[in-house]
Amino acid sequence: MTVIPKAEGNAAIELYKNDESQPEFMPDWRFFLIFMSLAIITLAASLDATSLSVALPIIASKLHGSAIEAFWAGTSFLLSSTVMMPSYGSFSHIFGRKPLLITAIVSFLTGSVICAVANNFVVLLVGRSWQGIGAGGVITLTEIIITDLVPLQERGKWYGLISAVWSVGSVSGPIIGGVFAQSVTWRWIFWINLPITGIGFICVILFLKQRMTRQESLKVQLCRVDWFGTILFIGATTSLLIPITWGGVMYPWSSPRTLIPFIVGVLGLAIFGPYEYYISKEPMVRLSVFNNPTSCIVYFQAFLHGVVLWSLLYYGPFFFEGVRGYSPVISGVAMFPETFTIAPVAAVTGIVVAMTGKYRWALWGGWVLTCVGFGLLYLQDARTSISIWVPLNLVPGVGMGMLFTSMALAIPAACNPIDMAHAVSVYTFFRVFGNCVGVAISGAVFQNQIRLNLMAYPLLANLAETYSEDAAALVEIIKVMENSPLKDQILQAYADSLKTVWVTMSAISGLALISNFWVKALTLQQSLVTEQGFRHKKKPSDAEESIQSHQLATSGDQSYVDLNEQNSTHEVLEKNVDCDQNTQSKLTSKIPKDKDCRVEDPYRVVKIKDGKSKSHRFIIRNASQAEKTL
């Protein structure tokens, strides 16, 4: 790919040319430092997402908090990170990746300090929310920046490494959190973020240098933001996620406190879609990211992947704590067959995909293993030996590891380059949104099933309603019970209820497996087309400066023509037509997938009639350049 910086009119633009002799991707030392910094802040975010879970009982005791406050301390992080993800994608398109990433890191660090010094749960919840806002940006912008820096075919190995880092952090989080809470102080769960994230923060400032295709004042950038759409989306998704999160925990699913905000959230999203498509000049979420059927299916799979993954991470430890009688820390270690398998498998899958240029095999294989793996977990009970349950737990870990990288590559392969940042942020949103829904689905299945199982035992029938309200609380009850037939019955009911959760997740994985029939095998051998590419210190050569792009969005026979090459057979039918957001989406949707093209609003559309073929072509050029040429 040849990138030619060019300033025309009131905006700086970049023109791209597909170069058949594109050199091999050769990352230099600055790239490795940037990637290392992204990996470090990803590690910190993943550690913080899971480290608090095992420490919540101790924190609740120290801060004199209730069970509900402890519940929200864990939930507020996931909730705030989820609702902010699409906004980061949109804002990074306007303000730039680096300023948004720095903002996200500062938010994460600020939240960490607030949590570390908190003396009551109100302050702790504020800090966790700030952490979540920052973590949402770290997760989203890390993937977006990788798409800016790495060609699509090479991207698999780097995505795999980031997925591996996230997996290591998610696995290590509960263990580190448990050790700090039991041996030192729970506040170190948050203080530890400062040195880790601080290193990544400094590296981002020093080494992340990206070109902006548009040079605008802050006032102009603020005017471009879709403020109403952003507020509407955040409000609607928050209203939707809160009842999903507390349904069956704080309030029954049939309670008005659950149903009313859920309905309000659905209505808000129903308004958001038409507003973005028909009214917003620069939508927060470009609906053109849903134009490709493959993209839509992979978004659906990302959501289901989040559902099954978080169900396993949340309810898997309950099996080891409640049924096997392990401590929280040992339960985290017992999850290693799943969690520590995900990281290396994700990395290896990315390398293989980069070598072969194909990703559908990983989608098929990943969902098959995930579906079968959850089915194998059905065989676990209180009497299952370690030599049996360890291999059983390996299978779903391998499957979900394969899916991390393959889905992340299918999205950019299917979307238009202009929509890349938006598509990646929507993908991460669906994946994390699935995490929230997964815990809710698993919780509903577990509660209903354990109530039925307990009622089957005469001695437990009267306690069925109380014991079924909270899976975590029931674990603590089981731990303090003396060995007796009553305890054996509860253990059996608990194990059988978890089996129903695994069967449900297996069915959901099977649904995702079937959806693979509609995922197309798109090429990964595409030139790197980015709006905020890597800024090298060396200047482009004279030859590069002289090249003019001929990759222009067209209609009709989808041929290409350069205004600089036009002759007397080209008749100008229309001149200086504003290229708004809807026009961009319509034009870019007609671009063949093997072409590299970008359409941006500082350009104008010129309609040209070819005197030979009588076909019409849309030529995209910056306004002042088009006027000059014509």
Image (spheres, grey):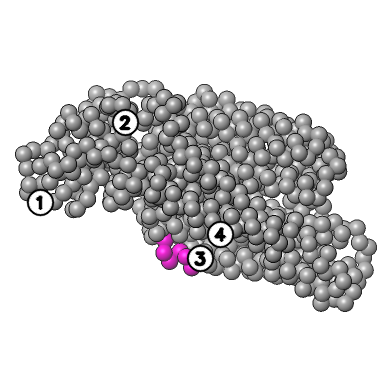
Check disc 1 and report its element: helix, strand or loop: loop
Q: Earlier in the sequence, mark 3 or mark 2?
A: 2
Q: Earlier in the sequence, mark 3 or mark 1?
A: 3
Which residue is denoted by mark 2 in the rendering? Answer: 13
- The quadrant where residue 14 appears: top left
Q: Pointer 1: residues within 10 angstroms few (<14), some, or many (20+)?
A: few
- Choose between 254 and 549: the one closer to the eye: 254
Q: Amino acid at mark 2?
A: Ile
Q: CA distance from mark 3 to mark 1?
A: 47 Å
Q: Position of residue 362 (x, y in %)?
A: 48, 58
Q: Earlier in the sequence, mark 2 or mark 1?
A: 2
Check disc 2 and report its element: helix, strand or loop: strand
Which residue is denoted by mark 1 in the rendering? Answer: 614
Q: How many marks?
A: 4
Check disc 3 and report its element: helix, strand or loop: helix
Decide whether residue 587 is among the magenta residues: no
Q: CA distance from mark 3 to mark 2?
A: 42 Å
Q: Pointer 4: residues within 10 angstroms few (<14), some, or many (20+)?
A: many
Q: Earlier in the sequence, mark 2 or mark 4?
A: 2
Report whether residue 342 is seen. Answer: no
Question: What segment is highlighted magenta in the picture?
Answer: 514-519
Decide whether residue 515 is among the magenta residues: yes
Q: Amino acid at mark 1?
A: Lys
Mark 2 vs mark 4: in front:
2
Mark 3 vs mark 1: in front:
1
Which residue is denoted by mark 3 in the rendering? Answer: 513
Query: Circles 2 and 1: CB distance less than 8 Å?
Result: no
Q: Pointer 2: residues within 10 angstroms few (<14), some, or many (20+)?
A: many
Mark 3 vs mark 4: in front:
4
Q: Position of residue 331 (x, y in %)?
A: 76, 53
Which residue is denoted by mark 4 in the rendering? Answer: 304
Mark 1 vs mark 4: in front:
1
